[in-house]
Structures are given as structure tokens and as C-alpha cells.
Image (cartoon, grey):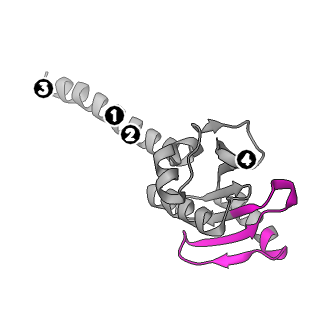
Amino acid sequence: MRRAFLVLLAIPLFWACAQGTSQAQTGATDACGLLSRAAIAKAAGLRVTRGKAGPPIAGSLSNCTWLGPKGVKIVVTVADAAHMQVTMQSQIQSGAAQISGIGTRAVGTAGNAETEGGYNLSILDAIGGVGVSILGKDGTAERAKALAKAIVARR
């Protein structure tokens, strides 16, 4: 009888542990869950709308977009390490700058005329990869780096 009780007690405990691990892994891959509007305002000084998950992109696990004034668009994309390494290598070949102090490796590129300027960061960390873009005239390297640091600290 005591053995049956211990088995019945262990099943919910095992289930709770498994659920906790699953939720932690999901949180690390949910792009919209990586930044709140308040965190964006604090880190980058930008007021934005609620983040909206985007359609699947090949090579990414999830992506999210926040819209701000003056055409500002913040896009966060979560990818596995292998896909992010390929992206980063391509960016380096195109002249991306190495950025220190964010994740285990990061590179940054200025936006182009099509995005009305802005700045893009690609980051590798202990969990995988994250892309952070602030598109539009208010998308500076400093703001993108601040958001990236907030994301990496949360992951």
C-alpha cells in the first residue's frame, strides 16, 4: 500500500517537472515573450504597440513585431544556433561589424534605404540565436544593442 502511494505521489511530481522544463524551453523560443512594451521603453526609449507574432520564417523558431511612432518597427527573431551561425557568416561577408559584450558572439549591420535605415543585430548565446532589428530612422545601433542585452539577460 505504501509503495502504491509513493508511485501515485511521484507521477504528479514527475509531470510537474516535465511541464516546467517544457515551459522554460518554450519561453526561450517565444519571440514575443522576450520583450514587454515596458522593457522596450526602458531599454530603447521607444513606445510601441503590443508585440504580434509573425508567420513562420524558414530557419526561425518564432518572430515578433512591435510597431512604434514615425514608422519604427522592432522585429525579434529566434533561431537555433546552426541557422544563426549561417546568417551571421553571411552578414560578416557583407561587412557586418563584430559586436562585443552581447551573448557569446554578435554582429551588427546598418539598415538600408528599403527599411528607411535602422540597425540589425544577430546574436548567438548559450541557448541559440536571436535577431534584433529596429527599422526606421529611430533604429540606432545603441537602441538595438540595449534591446539585445535585455533579451540575452532574460534568456
Dot 3 or dot 1: first in sequence order is 3
Quickly name the residue at label 3. 2
Quickly name the residue at label 2. 20
Which mark is in front, 3 or 1?
A: 1
Q: Does dot 4 land on a helix, a strand or a loop?
A: helix
The amino acid pointed to by label 1 is Ala
Q: Is residue 110 magenta?
A: yes
Quickly name the residue at label 1. 16
The amino acid pointed to by label 2 is Gly
On the rendered structure, is 140 left or right of 112? Answer: left
Along the viewing direction, whichever of 3 and 117 lies nearer the viewer: 117
In the figure, residue 50 lies in which quadrant?
A: top right
Which mark is in front, 3 or 2?
A: 2
Q: Does dot 2 land on a helix, a strand or a loop?
A: helix
Quickly name the residue at label 4. 71
Q: Does dot 3 land on a helix, a strand or a loop?
A: helix
Q: Does dot 1 land on a helix, a strand or a loop?
A: helix
